[in-house]
Image (cartoon, rainbow, N blue to C red):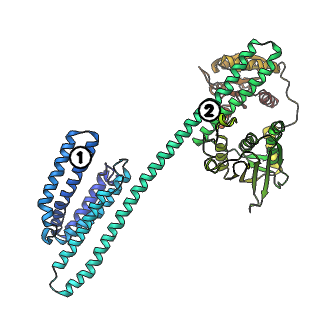
């Protein structure tokens, strides 16, 4: 029974089972030899009922499965139990001598135990048969009432005077009512629990179905949204190959815009995947809230102006502008919200971004409220209820003409949750939208800011001159190698290449100290990957060769990838596709050090 999940898993252990049987045997022994007759009466009565119910259940299941042999066995068993019932049970139903009073009491308790076993079986099983207790519940409860009444009748039959009968009626009646009441409560509770379990299963099915539908719709939208910039990239590239040089700049500008759009789509999908897998972590550093807000505003200033949107950023109410926060994540929140406000606000509308600070009751922390408000098209109540769910969009890009993955708000909500904050949304169709974020940040000092500036190497010094410096470019992809080599040579570097980490290690090991000034290392490569190659270089006997600056330049762009690069001995990490200004800055910073 334990293996079939009816009893506790502890009964699968031999020691526990033996101990249980010993306790049961001792209890029966202490109650005397009459106990055996009670159980004989009970099992004789119960066996017929149980055999009939089991046979009928076997017939029902076999019929759905089309198993004729089991159907026949179940039908024979059911008929046999009916015959036995008619012969042994029915004639003795109202005969007090059918069983002893103790056996009738055991019958009622056995029915109570039956409810518990039923509940345990249903709770531990995934069988669809446990949809309710219409038949089995009625049978068990009827047997319970029958057992209690026969027990009470048996006690009354033993009395020879009215006083004794009165005592039995009062005391026995209370016990009988209590047992029936407990049985009713247990039956209703089990019925409620089974229904609740099935409702939970149904809700989960609906949730999975809705999630599957949302994902299917998302993939459909992504197929459209990804193909749109890809079509532009392929189309303008084809035109550029056929046009004279004076036409190239316009085509290339459009190719670059479409490439950035495609990269944004891919990044959103990957970020949502990381969030769902619980792999996103916040990295807190001292930062300037006012600067983050202003930088986000500057990114959209030109777009807002071209669309004739009245755009404003307010941060003058800050008392403590320096805080400990994940700057990248906070910027992501602001960019997502401002981007949505821009997309869904028509020409001539307004968009405002503001941040306020209130007392947090803790001198070390500040309570901040970030508001992004627009006069755009607004949202319906139905969509607001699910706007932070992944893959949800009120209108597809085809219907609205507005690009997006439907992941921005879900990513925003996940980051705010990680920060311990909350989001409020006030909106209605045609009346714009206001999103308010409440979050607490630990206050940073100016000394913290200075230390952070020193660590990140932010300074106003001129960049390093790259002309005459030799760079080893390690890259296995021929197209990526060609693009990177052209960019680096335009910066002034003298570039040598290696197609994998093993070749790079051999070139460095055989070179003179100072021959290579810096190495750009891809990570995923055949023969030897970038991490292994870096460790090999760092372990060279000549410490001057082992200390050559190495930068990762890879499509592995997550925080754990940056950490892995540093753990391998690299000085910096540059994400692909390469942004030339970032590449120049990182190379300059590393060579400067």
Circle 2 residue: 222
Q: Secondary structure at mark 1?
A: helix
Q: Position of residue 346 (x, y in %)?
A: 77, 41
Residue 558 vs residue 384, the one in the foreground? 384
Is residue 7 visible in the rendered structure shown here?
A: yes
Q: Within the image, what quadrant is residue 566 found in?
A: top right
On screen, 440 above or below 532? below
On screen, 156 above or below 376? below
Residue 484 vs residue 513, the one in the foreground? 484
Q: Within the image, what quadrant is residue 98 found in?
A: bottom left
Q: Residue at x 63, y 30 (%)?
A: 224
Q: Is residue 228 left or right of residue 315?
A: left
Circle 1 residue: 59
Q: Position of residue 317 (x, y in %)?
A: 83, 55
Q: Residue at x 58, y 32 (%)?
A: 220
On screen, 301 above or below 554? below
Q: Are marks 1 and 2 in contact (CB under 8 Å)?
A: no
Q: Within the image, what quadrant is residue 501 found in?
A: top right
């Amino acid at each position: 029974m334990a293996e079939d999940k009816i009893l506790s898993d502890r009964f699968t252990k031999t020691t526990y089972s033996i101990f249980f049987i010993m306790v049961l045997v001792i209890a029966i022994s202490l109650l005397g030899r009459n106990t055996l007759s009670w159980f004989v009466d009970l099992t004789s009565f119960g066996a017929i009922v149980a055999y009939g119910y089991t046979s009928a259940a076997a017939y029902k299941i076999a019929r759905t499965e089309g198993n004729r042999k089991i159907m026949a066995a179940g039908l024979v068993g059911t008929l046999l139990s009916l015959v036995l019932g008619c012969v042994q049970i029915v004639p003795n139903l109202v005969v007090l001598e059918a069983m002893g009073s103790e056996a009738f009491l055991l019958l009622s308790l056995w029915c109570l135990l039956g409810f518990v076993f039923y509940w345990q079986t249903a709770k531990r099983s995934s069988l669809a048969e446990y949809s309710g207790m219409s038949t089995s519940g009625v049978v068990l409860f009827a047997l319970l009432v029958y057992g209690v009444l026969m027990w009470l009748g048996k006690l009354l039959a033993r009395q020879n005077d009215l006083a004794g009968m009165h005592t039995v009626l009062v005391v026995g009646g209370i016990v009988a009512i209590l047992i029936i009441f407990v049985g009713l409560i247990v039956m209703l509770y089990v019925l409620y629990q089974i229904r609740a379990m099935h409702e939970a299963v149904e809700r989960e099915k609906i949730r999975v179905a809705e999630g599957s539908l949302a994902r299917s719709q998302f993939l459909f939208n992504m197929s459209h949204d990804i193909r749109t910039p890809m079509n532009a990239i392929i189309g303008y590239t084809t035109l550029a190959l056929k046009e004279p040089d004076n036409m190239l700049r316009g085509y290339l500008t459009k190719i670059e815009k479409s490439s950035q759009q495609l990269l944004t789509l891919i990044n959103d999908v990957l970020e949502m995947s990381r969030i769902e897998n619980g792999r996103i972590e916040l990295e807190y550093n001292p930062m300037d809230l006012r600067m983050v807000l202003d930088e986000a505003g500057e990114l959209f200033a030109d777009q807002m102006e071209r669309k004739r949107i009245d755009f404003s950023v307010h941060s003058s109410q800050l008392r403590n502008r320096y805080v400990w926060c994940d700057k990248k994540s906070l910027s992501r929140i602001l960019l997502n919200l401002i981007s949505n406000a821009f997309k869904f606000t028509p020409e001539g509308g307004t968009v405002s971004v503001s941040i306020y600070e209130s007392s947090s009751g803790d001198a070390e922390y500040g309570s901040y409220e970030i508001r992004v408000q627009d006069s755009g098209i607004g949202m319906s109540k139905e969509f607001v209820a699910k706007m932070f769910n992944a893959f949800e969009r009120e209108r597809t890009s085809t219907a609205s003409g507005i690009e997006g993955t439907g992941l921005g708000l879900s990513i925003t909500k996940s980051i705010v949750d990680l920060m311990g904050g909350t989001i409020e949304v006030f909106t209605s169709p045609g009346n714009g939208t206001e999103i308010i974020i409440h979050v607490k940040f630990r206050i940073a000092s100016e000394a913290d800011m200075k230390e952070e500036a020193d660590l990140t190497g932010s300074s106003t010094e001129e960049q390093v001159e790259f002309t005459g410096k030799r760079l080893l470019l390690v890259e296995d992809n021929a197209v990526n190698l060609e693009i990177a080599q052209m960019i680096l040579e335009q910066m002034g570097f003298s570039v040598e290449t290696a197609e994998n980490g093993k070749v790079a290690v051999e070139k460095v090991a055989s070179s003179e100290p100072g021959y290579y000034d810096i190495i750009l290392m891809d990570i995923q490569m055949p023969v030897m990957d970038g991490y292994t190659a870096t460790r090999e270089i760092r372990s060279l006997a000549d410490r001057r060769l082992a200390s050559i600056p190495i930068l990762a330049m890879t499509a592995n762009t997550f925080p754990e990838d940056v950490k892995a690069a540093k753990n391998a001995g690299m000085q910096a990490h540059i994400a692909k596709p390469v942004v030339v200004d970032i590449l120049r800055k990182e190379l300059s910073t590393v060579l400067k050090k």
